[in-house]
Image (cartoon, coloured by chain):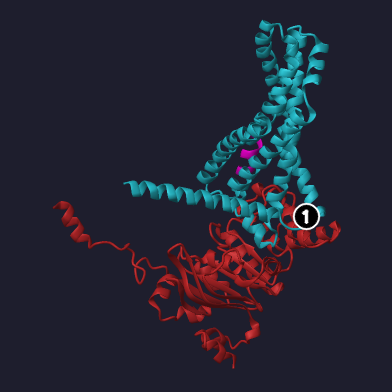
Chain colours: A red, B cyan
Amino acid sequence: MYIAFYSFRGTTALAAAESINVSDILIDIQQLTFSRGDRVIYRDLNMQFARGKVTAIMGPSGIGKTTLLRLIGGQLKPDSGHIMFGNEDIPLLSRNALYAARQRMSMLFQSGALFTDMTVFDNVAFPIREHTRLPESLIRLIVLMKLEAVGLRGARDLMPAELSGGMARRAALARAIALDPELILYDEPFAGQDPISMGVIVRLIRSLNNALNLTSVVVSHDVTEVMSIADYVYVVAEQTVIGHGTPEQLRAHPSPLVQQFLKGEADGAVPFHFKAAPYEQELMELVG
Amino acid sequence: MIADKLQQIGAATIGNVRGYGRAGIMLFGALLGKPDIRKGFPLLVKQLYVIGVLSLLIILVSGLFIGMVLALQGYTVLVKFGAEQMLGPLVALSLLRELGPVVTALLFAGRAGSAITAEIGLMKATEQLSGMEMMAVDPLRRIIAPRFWAGVISMPLLAVIFTAVGILGGHLVGVDWLGVDGGGYWSAMQANVDLYQDVMNGVIKSMVFALIVIWIALHKGYDAVPTSEGISQATTQTVVTASLAVLAFDFILTALMFGG
């Protein structure tokens, strides 16, 4: 029944491959179209993120992966299509309902987006203080637990400017899990990290996902790291999904574009050369 | 050629009107809704300190010197007509009606307005505003609203302080240095300054300027292109636009209050 339901939207693969229930899907993106000015970013995009899993979205730079996270978070509105978060369609929510939905999700920004005028402790305490009326002693307890989970309990009194890039991202991660969200969106969590902090973040994403029963969506173009932690991967290019499956399925994917991306080949379905007149012809014209 | 020019003018006008619209929506979003006293009050107090108290020094020094210069300049003219006992009203009225509100607003735009624009622009560039939104905290209410109210409350107070210090500066030069009669300085001032016509109109002017300057500063920061170049442009625009707007509105308000 549910397979028929999904095949109606042309996305049988995930439901069939993993044989999961509709209720196991936390986010269901249907027929999403989004454009900036005249430039179409996504055309009829379909994606599903299963509850409790790490789903990765990969693709070349500049195709709007971050935009997709902002669409899920309701910061941008699509031209058409649905983004179902549980039973709610994010683009149609009223302001109050959207803010209520955002309390159940978190986003880890590429820069960390820590508040520079507060200590690490206050940064992590910020969402708790804003959304609950817990006594300060309890907030202290929660914050220390979250900081312990990312290994920064000792850095609680530092200001964000005193943290290294990797530490800032971990502090931001502690803040993102402060209110125990259902969903966490990672925007390029591995970009610009040294191998050690990259390893730490890879481990954290996986272990937090399992320990806190989160649903994680990781946007990245770091193939190795993503393939090592993701349960399911979507490869996005040319305004839509060009391939999806478990990492094993994806490695055997027939599409040359997917293969080129996974192997990082310079030339292939995505040509090395930007569109231009034939080289010889142009040289001959110059020589006259 | 002419069509191109017309098109440019049209595009610029539409851009401007859009800007006003966005500024209006921003303010509307920030001020609409029930204020949360428990969370809002500490934020307001912090901004009153940053925007108001930290601007005190420049206001005090400028007020003192402008009062002193006014007395010096006024005395040299008045003494020719033997009217130096009118120095008190001259200093007081100039400051109350014009210089107090206007110069305070210009200094405020340079001191606090530029800082607010840069701060909010940088918050935007470092995704702090987006981050806040994703944490289900409305940056308009958390960041914009307290700064707006702090500006609107502190600027008229700063203008009053500026004027008071200016009058004392006038006394320092006129009475203590140039030898104008001290009793005459105060009594002539008392006789010629009207509470409603002069003091209240000055305060009203200052309130209008406060609204304009803080609104422009907040909007330029919130609307800044989130790059280093964009923020530097936004900061400059805040000072230039706010200063020009203050002078334009000063003329309009003066015409309305004292013109008839």
Is B83 or B211 nearer to us in this picture? B83
In the displayed orientation, state which residue is furthest to the left. Answer: A288
Residue density around tag 1, few if under 14, some if 14–19, many if 20 or more, within 10 Å = few
Closer to us: A69 or B256 = B256
Q: Amino acid at mark 1?
A: Pro
| Residue at the bottom extreme, as displayed | A1
The answer, for residue B125, to whether it is visible in the render is no
Q: Is residue B47 above or below residue A256?
A: above
Q: Residue B112 magenta-drawn?
A: yes
Q: Position of residue B95 (x, y in %)?
A: 70, 24
Q: Position of residue A54 (x, y in %)?
A: 60, 74
Q: Which residue is mark 1?
A: B35
Give the main secondary structure of the magenta stretch: helix
**Image height of A72 relative to A153, above or below:** below
Q: Residue under mark 1: which chain is it in?
A: B
Residue A229 locus on image (x, y percent) = 58, 72
Q: Find the magenta span and give its range.
A: B111-118
